Amino acid sequence: MKRAYYIFYKDFSSELRMRFALNALIMFVIVAVSTILFSLANEKVNQNVYAGMFWVVVFFSAMSGLSRTFVSEEERGTTLILSLIANPISIFIGKFLFNLVLLFFINTIIAFLYMILFQDFSIQNWDSFLLAFILGNIGIAGSSTIIAAIISKANVKGTLYPVLAFPVLLPLILMLIEITKSAMEGNPISDVEAELMVLISYDIIMITASVLVFDIIWRD
Amino acid sequence: MNNIQLIVKNLKKTFNRRLVFDKLSFEVRAGERLVITGKNGSGKSTLIKILAGVMNESSGSFEYIFDSGKIDREDIYKIIGLVSPYLVLYDEFSAFENLKLFAKIRNLKIDDDKINQILEKAGLFNRRNDLVRTYSSGMKQRVKYASAILHDPLVLLLDEPTSNLDIEGKDFVDELVQNFRKDGIVVVATNETQDFKYGQRIINLDDYKNNQSK
Ligand SMILES: Nc1ncnc2c1ncn2[C@@H]1O[C@H](COP(=O)(O)OP(=O)(O)OP(=O)(O)O)[C@@H](O)[C@H]1O
Ligand SMILES: [Mg+2]
């Protein structure tokens, strides 16, 4: 665990210096949110649309930023030194932690922007929204990390990412939209119990499976 | 008595259909120094990567035995120090930061003095706080040596050990190999005849190219 933490720490310091992921992410969020803002100006849309639109922006910002973790190591040729100083499990956990922190940071910004820019994006039941937000970030970070590891070994890095990630993340995104809708309508948390259980199972399965297959992907 | 031993049995590596080497068997005992040679593309670097545990073999096996117990695949990195031209360090950090990070990630209990000592030995002390990206290729090669000996490994794998090094740098490598722990193993992959002096024994990979050769 300590080793994983220091791999996270390495990526974090490196990100502070190089901004591999952060600049791309922030640009994406600004462009996406302002496009939505301008196209919806003065239109009266169903409140539910915002729930969907929120997670769509989250999905694509994850797509544009989270693959950097492994791709940048592969592109710069540092994969070798990394595998010489740590075992695969620590590497996976370290990278997962980094993506998780990045995702929480970016998604908090997105949520914040939505709340101040769109009056209709108002959460009535914070408990269920926050639970969905936390479980959703864990699930997205877990899947993104393992998919990033897979594509970093492929020849067609950039384009493959959303293609692979979409089917894997679709069930997760659908659940998240459901819960967010319900939270906006102010329904009690018990209404989305089933969805929350699915989220928890998704996270557990995704992370366990990832740790198991990472070893194979990592040593080619 | 702590005793390291490397046993390679019938090792074979292919990339897709292309055979790199086959039926490669040898043993290296504690204290031995082995030189691997062969033409360009004969698989020296491939063998080094397999022995470092970062690339999978196609068939056959290799194992490190320590104290009569086999070292697990996922623990091999702990006993290996590797230097090679294709090893790239984090160039957004300085030499000192690189070593410090590696020590942390490896969970080593060494302090800054020890890191400075290693950098001093590698002749980088004066430039230790400059970013690695500002280093010359010989200096980068020296940081790799520093990172390879940081954790006091039992096995030193050196691919083209003297590439990019000046006379002083070559002397440093000579000394390093000479003074490397007597209970350890050194494997050098090279085409430079002047590097052959590092080993007591030479394996030529050109002899392991087809299925007939034995
Ligand atoms: N990742 C890879 N994918 C496909 N083929 C590879 C890969 N790495 C190496 N090869 C092939 O394996 C063979 C051996 O390569 P290797 O780099 O081990 O040779 P080498 O003996 O180190 O050569 P040199 O003296 O030029 O350093 C070459 O034919 C090379 O094309
Ligand atoms: Mg080579």
Image (cartoon, helix red, strand yellow):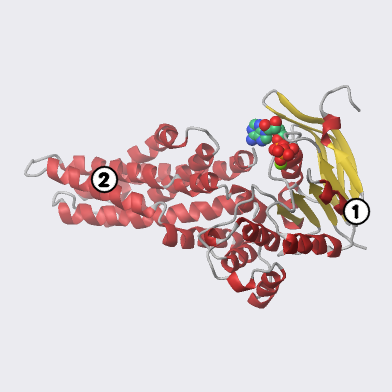
User: For this rendering, which residue is in front, A205 or B113?
Assistant: B113
User: Mark 2 = which residue?
Assistant: A54
Tag 2: Cα neighbours inside 10 Å, few (<14), some, or many (≥20)?
some
User: For this rendering, which residue is in front, A61 or B14?
Assistant: B14
The quarter of the rendered structure image containing the N terminus of chain B is bottom right
- Which residue is at the far left? A42
Left or right? Give the position of B13 relative to A25: right
Query: Percent position (x, y) of residue A201?
Result: 47, 43
Q: Which amino acid, by three-letter code, is at mark 2?
A: Phe
User: Mark 1 = which residue?
Assistant: B32
Left or right? Give the position of A116 relative to A14: left
Query: Percent position (x, y) of residue B47?
Result: 76, 40
Query: Percent position (x, y) of residue A200?
Result: 44, 47
Kindly report the distance in space between the C-alpha atoms of the residues bearing marks 2 and 1: 63 Å
For image coordinates 29% across by 50% down, the residue present is: A27
Q: Which chain carries label 2?
A: A
